[in-house]
Image: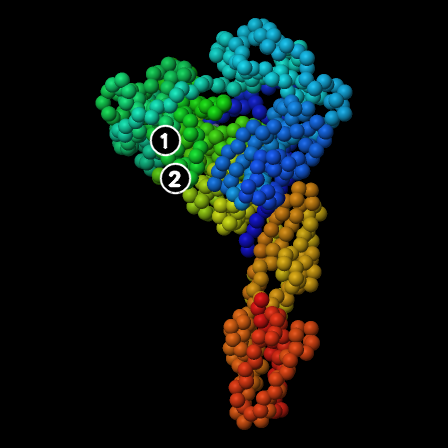
Amino acid sequence: MKQAVFLILLFCLLYPAIFAQKHGQTTQTDNIAWSGEERLAKAHFTQYKLGANYQLPDVQNYLYQTIGNLQTSGAGLQFTGKTESPVGAHFHFVQTYRNMPVYGTQILITIDKTGTTGPITENTYALDLPLLKTLFPDKAQINETAMVNRFAAENKVKPEWPAAMQLFFITENQPVIAVQFKGWTLENRGFFEYLTDTSGQLIYRRDLQNYFGPKKSTQTETVPAQIFNPNPVTTAHVVYGQGGKYKDNNDADAPELTAELKNTTIEVTYEDGLYKLENAYAKIAEFDNPVILPVTTTLPQFNFTRSDDGFEDVNAFYHVNAFQQYLQSLGFTLVQTQVLIDTHGKNGQDQSLHIYNNGNHQLIFGSGHSVGIEHVDDAEDADVIVHEYGHAVSASACPNCNSGLERTAIDEAICDYLATSYKRAINDYNWQNMFSWDGHNEFWNGRNVTSTKHYPEDNKLDIYYRSEIFSSVLMQIWDAVGKEAADKIVISALYQFSSGISMETAANILLYVDNQLYGGQHVQTLQSLLQQRGLLEYQANAGPDFEVCLGNTVILGVPNAPPAPEGVNMYWSPGLTLNDSTLANPTANPDRPTVYTLYLVDKVSNIAYTDDAFVDVQYCFNNPPGNEIRLLNTDRFFKRRGNIILEVPPGTEQVKVAIYDALGRFVKAITNAGDMRLEVSGDDMPPGIYHMVVEADGKKATFTIGRVR
Ligand SMILES: [Zn+2]
């Protein structure tokens, strides 16, 4: 019984404070009061045909019709960008009020390749417009440049120009007009977004951690290199420290670790007599302490052992490129900019992160042999590398989408999933240990992607703790549908993972994507696994499939099915051959094989949870035992490919045939002399069920026959 979910409206948390995602410890935020941190976002699953030649205004008009918060005077939409995936196009907007953006809002809609609308996720505000109109002019009459300069001088900030923009910022209590700009802190070269009120008082600040990427190089050569693939304990089929070996030992070489080095090739740049770890997709660089310059060579090879600083450079460079090539093989064009990678950063802490701003991506990996800090170098483990690159993949599919308390946990789960999928295809030993080499050791426990954590009980306020709910169900999907289909579904779904969505919304987007990419081939499997995790609210159960004889009836649904839950409307479709399509157990009287779909439609959200029951209709040869009157060729007659042949006992003198429809109305009669075979043609009989009464001298028999549509 195939199941599908089409529509959903769910609420969740939103806050845009985090741009840097660390793979391990708690993420720091830098918030001052803002109402958006725990705000609810909504999803609308729609199916409206805009047509193949739709234009941007058609999309905007549809959003105005669909989103109530856009229908009041003064409310508007501002288009901010578009991405494309195997599913279709994804349009990004922010909400505006009197042509000023409303801070932190995001509206994202998917339009599939046929021009039909799909999910809309949005966190718009219901603005109290009369109140706002009284409180605020259209724009504050202030000198923004002077105000920003004054703020910058007082706070030791170097502003980025062109800078200031006025927008609406919704505080805990009321909306205010704010001035937004970006700037570098002079002391520790941090990069922040600032919002002040119109008098220049700071309202809100968030860390953007931006660094600007250089031009990309295209002059490349393919050279040999040594890497861990994916890491030494996985390929050696051991656990960390097994037999007193396979330990970090302060980054020292050891024979058992050197034995796990794998030979490969990498595409590098040759410039000014040096080979450099740089190509169109990645560049090893120095931009975060400690200062350890990127490795270069004069010979065309990068064969290092783990004690060399160059080894981490090569290992990160290889795995980022390998994952990018895999994305391309699946048909995705993501992270097409050159990612900057510092494999010895975070002042040696056991922490790695991804930074994204204005389309530039950077990855920083903690190195584990600074003074007083010991742990495995993060860039020695493909799990860490692909996890951090996964954040770049996510930000490329859905720019500025990773905010909201639950949404950020989903991003961690996606990155753990991508890393595990990548690793498991290379070597599946202990694949459930996320961060197999970097974690699961004396320094850090790592994470587990075969967790039994359940939603919502385990949806606690720790993004890494609760991320295991989602990463673990994704790995179950991986098991059930295979790596390639699972990867394609998960990565395609990312394009619709806008700010503030919940895990429940994300689960429904996965189902939408499977319907789009695979015609719903895996929907039953996905729905069942997601339901077990607590990520789908209702479940439709259409009960067993049936085989019936033509003319017989069958009762659909789970025997003695409970009534529909309060919040949903329930019906079966098609209803034509049912006694009452709104019953939990309707009586079906199909005249041909029929798929009946049970719908549970959430009254508030319009989400439809569905399940199918198939009723196969057989022609049953219902000759009573001992009866000498027989029908032949009934199956072909049923399928409208031939006539029924009637056989009667030898020596019969007269045969009378009368045919009635399902309601007992006379259709036609045939009379035949003698015991010759008699043919009954159905050419003049519309599709349906009939009763055929045969009299052969004194003997009588009744048959049910039918013609399919
Ligand atoms: Zn992460």
Please say if 115 is above or below 145: below
Q: Regarding mark 1 in the picture, which secondary structure is present there?
A: helix
Q: Residue at x 75, y 19 (%)?
A: 135
Q: Residue at x 51, y 49 (%)?
A: 519
Q: Is residue 383 left or right of residue 490?
A: left
Q: Residue at x 31, y 25 (%)?
A: 219
Residue 670, position in %: x, y? Answer: 61, 84
Colour treatment of the image? rainbow
Q: Is the N terminus in the top left, top right, bottom left or bottom right quadrant?
A: bottom right
Q: Is residue 22 visible?
A: no
Q: Nearer the viewer, mark 1 or mark 2?
A: 2
Cα distance between the residues tagged 1 and 2: 12 Å
Among the 4 quarters of the image, the one containing residue 62: top right
The disc labelled 1 sits on which kind of residue?
A: Asn
Residue 134, position in %: x, y? Answer: 76, 20
Residue 202, position in %: x, y? Answer: 62, 13
* Residue 509, disc: none
The disc labelled 2 sits on which kind of residue?
A: Ser
* Residue 321, disc: 1
Among the 4 quarters of the image, the one containing residue 651: bottom right
Residue 17, position in %: x, y? Answer: 57, 22
Q: Is the C terminus in the top left, top right, bottom left or bottom right quadrant?
A: bottom right
